[in-house]
Amino acid sequence: MASSRSPDSSKATSERFQKVERLLHSPEFRKVFKSGRCLLLDCVRIHYLPSASDLSRLGLVVSRKLGNAVTRNQIKRRLRDIFRRNKFRIPIPLDVIVVANAKNGPATYFEYAEAFEKFLHEAQRDPKIVSSLDSNEEGEVADDV
């Protein structure tokens, strides 16, 4: 049976949230928590660290304090969707862990999206990331000469 998506459609495949873009294992989470930076926002806490892979990867932490399984899964779907739509705006590949804040209860999609916008803005100003971008640009210039 024919698929409704064309196989050569790069947008259809590139905007998907693939398994390789997920942080799945405890050592990966520990590394980001221990060595990464942290940004505390109203509805989330975002930990991030430059990634060893070529892709930005996402890990989620959603506590039972936020509600039952249906509520927690809804929060995770929202956060994954926001990451999926904005992963191309992250300046360099990062391992990102989003910890949903249970203090005020579940936030709306737009509150999570606004928090991710603040993260993107902060990540572009982060000295570690800026220095990585500068060294990559210098390497590209050296290769061209």
Image: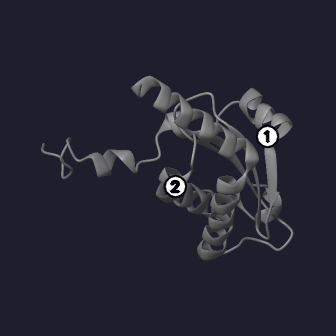
Depicted 100 relative to depicted 132: above or below: below
Residue hosting label 1: 36
- Asked whether 65 or 119 is in front, the reply is 119
Give whichever of discs 1 and 2 has the lower sequence position: 1
Residue hosting label 2: 89
- Quarter of the figure with the N terminus: top left
Q: Residue 62 at what x, y percent from top left?
A: 74, 54
Residue 66 falls in which quadrant of the image? bottom right
How busy is the neighbourhood of tag 1: few (under 14 within 10 Å), some, or many (20 plus)? some
Horizontal arrangement in the rendering, residue 51 relative to residue 105 (left or right): left
- Asked whether 125 or 49 is in front, the reply is 125
User: What residue is shown at x 40% (from left), y 27% (from top)?
Assistant: 144
How busy is the neighbourhood of tag 2: few (under 14 within 10 Å), some, or many (20 plus)? few
Q: Residue 40 at what x, y percent from top left?
A: 82, 61
- Quarter of the figure with the C terminus: top left
Q: Residue 115 at what x, y percent from top left?
A: 68, 67
Horizontal arrangement in the rendering, residue 126 relative to residue 80 (left or right): right
Kind of element beneath mark 2: helix
Q: Amino acid at mark 1?
A: Gly
